[in-house]
């Protein structure tokens, strides 16, 4: 009997430790990452990337030269209420601003391009229910960035200044 109680207690503790306690601001819209800045949330810019293939590479371009969602943090933190979106599928990418739009080129055919299309490492932490914290695990230089689900051309853009 004691062994069963001990096992139940340890199982409950392990379950509760899997999610961090979060008492900060909550996203007003589901499935949209928000930049956490002190005690307020800043909605990321939602866009659809246009896809173009050329010589085995795929270039994704986004309208507009700069995102209106900005953060001064070099390692931004995002909060998302992921009801229909898999938070673990979000990739973080640096975008190049060119000719009034932002773009990124991904290499095809297993070739590796210098600096092109490399995802930036992120940490995804469940906060309870559908709420997740996503953190850039690398220092981000000033510039344009996007979070994007791996199975979609939807992008959530922001800028680091």
Image (tube, helix red, strand yellow):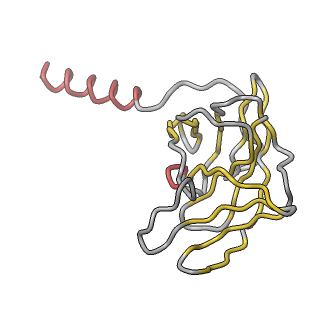
In-front residue for pair 137/31: 137
Where's the C terminus, which quadrant?
top right
Which quadrant of the structure image shows residue 35?
Answer: top right
| Percent position of residue 139, x then y | 59, 32
Is the residue 150 above or below the residue 6 in the image?
below
Say left or right for 69 vs 129: right
Q: Is residue 124 above or below residue 116?
A: above
Q: Where's the N terminus, which quadrant? A: top left
- Quadrant hosting residue 76: top right
Q: Residue at x 78, y 55 (%)?
A: 97
In the image, is 122 to the left or to the right of 152?
left
> At 69% from the left edge and 46% from the top edge, which residue is drawn?
33
Residue 36 point in image, percent of width and height: 71, 32
Residue at x-position 83% and y-position 64%: 63
Q: How many marks?
A: 0
Nearest to the observer: residue 23 or residue 159: 159
Q: Is residue 55 left or right of residue 156?
A: left
Q: Residue sitting at 14 percent across and 19 percent down?
A: 2
Q: For residue 8, which quarter of the picture?
A: top left
Q: Please tell me which residue lies in front, 88 or 159.
A: 159
x and y percentages locating residue 133 in the rendered image? 58, 36
């Amino acid at each position: 009997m004691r062994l069963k109680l001990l096992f139940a207690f340890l199982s409950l503790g392990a379950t509760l430790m899997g999610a961090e306690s979060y008492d900060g601001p909550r996203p007003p819209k589901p499935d949209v990452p928000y930049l956490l800045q002190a005690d307020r949330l800043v909605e990321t810019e939602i866009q659809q990337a246009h896809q173009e293939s050329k010589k085995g590479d795929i270039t994704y371009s986004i309208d507009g030269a700069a995102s209106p969602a900005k953060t001064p943090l070099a390692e931004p933190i995002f909060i998302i209420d992921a009801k229909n979106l898999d938070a673990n599928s979000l990739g973080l990418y640096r975008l190049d601003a060119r000719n009034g739009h932002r773009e990124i080129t991904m290499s095809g055919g297993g070739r590796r391009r210098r600096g092109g299309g490399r995802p930036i490492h992120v940490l995804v932490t469940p906060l309870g229910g559908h709420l997740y914290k996503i953190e850039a695990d690398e220092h981000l230089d000033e510039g344009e960035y996007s979070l994007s689900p791996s199975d979609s051309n939807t992008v959530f853009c922001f800028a680091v200044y």
